Image (cartoon, rainbow, N blue to C red):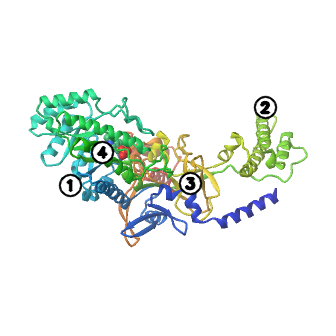
Amino acid sequence: MAITQKTDDIQRQQQATKWDTERSVELYGVRDWGSDYFDISADGNAVVSIQFGDSTVQVPIIDIVNGMKERGLEMPAVLRIENLLDQRIKQLNEAFANAIKQADYQSYYRGVFPIKVNQQCHVIEEIADFGRHYHHGLEAGSKAELIIALSQLKDHDSLIICNGYKDAEFIDLGLYARQMGIPCFFVIETLSELPIILARSAALGIEPLIGVRIRLASMVEGHWNEDSGDRSIFGLSTNALLDVVEQLKQSNMLHCLQMLHSHLGSQIPNIRNIRTGVLEACRFYTGLIEEGAPMGYIDLGGGLAVDYEGTRTNTTHSMNYSLEEYCSNIVETIQESFEPLGIAHPVIVSESGRALVAYSSMLLFNILDVRDHKPGKLPETLPEDSHDLLGNLFYVLQNVTLKNLQECYNDSLYYRDEMREEFHRGQSSLRERALAENISLAILEKISELLPQATRISPELETLPELLSDIYYGNFSLFQSLPDIWAMDQIFPIMPIHRLGEEPTRNAVLADITCDCDGKIDSFAHADGIRKTLPLHALKDNEEYYLSVFLVGAYQETLGDLHNLFGDTNVVSVHINEDGSFDFVREFHGDSIADVLSYVEYDPKVMEEQFRRIAEQAVRDGKITVSVRQQILKAFREGMQGYTFFER
Ligand SMILES: *Cc1c(COP(=O)(O)O)cnc(C)c1O
């Protein structure tokens, strides 16, 4: 035993000397999913890369984390890189502009950001601010979102697109925007909206800009595809569409119908589906022109995907096309549809949310604890009078070879379970059971180490490394910060942000601190497909180990819930400068315990008073002194003001 242990260590060391950051780049696939924004530096740190003209500035994320610590912003935290948001707005708009130029398309592109994808004030402000140059507008799906759009957009060439159910109040706001010269479209999703729009328009004497959302028959692959096809809950059926046209004609308002709207769903992995959808939308557009509507705008909704896996395939969490292909496919399909018919090229509108904001945020957290499945120290030999089952297990342990892996696997589990039975019946002791489990684990570990050399492996043995993997407990709540992992089995790239020059010798699944069995991450993106475990580094004493979940800017921040009353995390926005320095442009301290308690209708003041009475009674009963009472009340008050997550 001792001897094998030693050779293992030597092998490990030899491997460790061979490890370098390039191998980490490959292992974590950072250049595949990082889209030039993330990389690993030569000294083993994850970096954010920002392009300034021809030069690239790289900032280690760990430096930003250290800066956060100095400012009292503890883990977990959402880190937003403002530059990445700007970069994405620029790339999307320029990709469309290039496609339009290349095709000699006779109109232009107008993007709108769907507020629901990330409503956070700083994100919307930055999009409105930086996007102004490209007249990038906003899409609102509710009154609250329309109010955000009206207060944030300062450019009257940017569109506001109103989707969702609209009541009279919503419509009045949109009409007033129209009166002030803001191009604000009402997209009709159901027949019942139209009479309200017509009535409010007549009452206020303001003509609306109207779009119609159609229900495409084209079906779409992927996770979020329920927005497409006949059963979609959104959009007008063909019959309802003609009804809208009829009502508009009757009220002499057909000239207000200027936009065709379609949304195929989010995260569309296959470019073919996009092309088919655009083609069908063009047919509807043509039909409406034939009905006498002026039209002028074609809005293709969202759907532009993010390659979370980095595999460039048409699987759910990936995409088989580039941004440039997406744009040129849309531009060319529209052009090819309308050219033969002599229809003027419409303004192309898209509502990309995910692709615009996903890259700009990451969730950072530290590891609190590790539970490994390593066997404890085993005796060199067993005492003479040992339990028979222990003898059997020990024999198996000493005789594992490449040839009998399956047999040893079966035996180790069999004897271990027999021992558990004996324990049940009171025929073996706690110590005997513990030793049996330990030896069994040592056998499984030996088998697992030999597996890579084995030629044929049973499915049972294939899952062994997973069974033996560690659990790394992270300081975050899945339900609060990564709801789509829990709700939709979403995959996000996850990687340590430092120590990437060292070999990660452990295989782990991640658990959050909610102690809920659903609060774990056990699917990880990998070049060969999805993996059940993530290679990580062994923890060092007195040193934090930080991980980052990347590409979490879309849909994660406001969907989260208060499971176990873990609240909002700290949020930091950073702007990276050309000289490699960075500014903390925004800091938000996450919820305190008092905050989350008040969300569920407790009054922290009342609670403190109730607790004070309990402490006072304890003084009266002689259980504590007054000065201890003061200490206890202080701890209670400080607890109330503290962060909901684990504080060091
Ligand atoms: C959600 C949504 C979007 C955003 O879709 P992404 O795939 O995130 O780009 C756009 N338009 C509408 C109508 C939506 O409901």
Which residue corresponds to mark 3?
Answer: 368
Crowding around mark 4 (Cα neighbors within 10 Å: few <14, some 14 to 19, many 20+) is few
Task: Say if 236 sits above or below 608 in the image.
Answer: above
Which residue corresponds to mark 1?
Answer: 154
x and y percent of residue 145 in the render?
27, 44
Q: Would you identify the image quadrant in which residue 412 lies?
A: top right
Which residue corresponds to mark 4?
Answer: 336
Cβ–Cβ under 8 Å for marks 2 and 1: no
Question: Which numbered disc, 1 or 3, marks the residue that appears first in the sequence?
Answer: 1
Q: CA distance from mark 1 to mark 3?
A: 46 Å
Which residue corresponds to mark 2?
Answer: 425
Identity of the amino acid at label 4? Glu
Dot in front, 1 or 3: 1
Q: Residue at x 56, y 40 (%)?
A: 517
Q: CA distance from mark 2 to mark 1?
A: 77 Å
Q: Ligand 1 closer than 8 Å to the CB at disc 1? A: no
Secondary structure found at label 2: loop
Q: CA distance from mark 1 to mark 4?
A: 35 Å
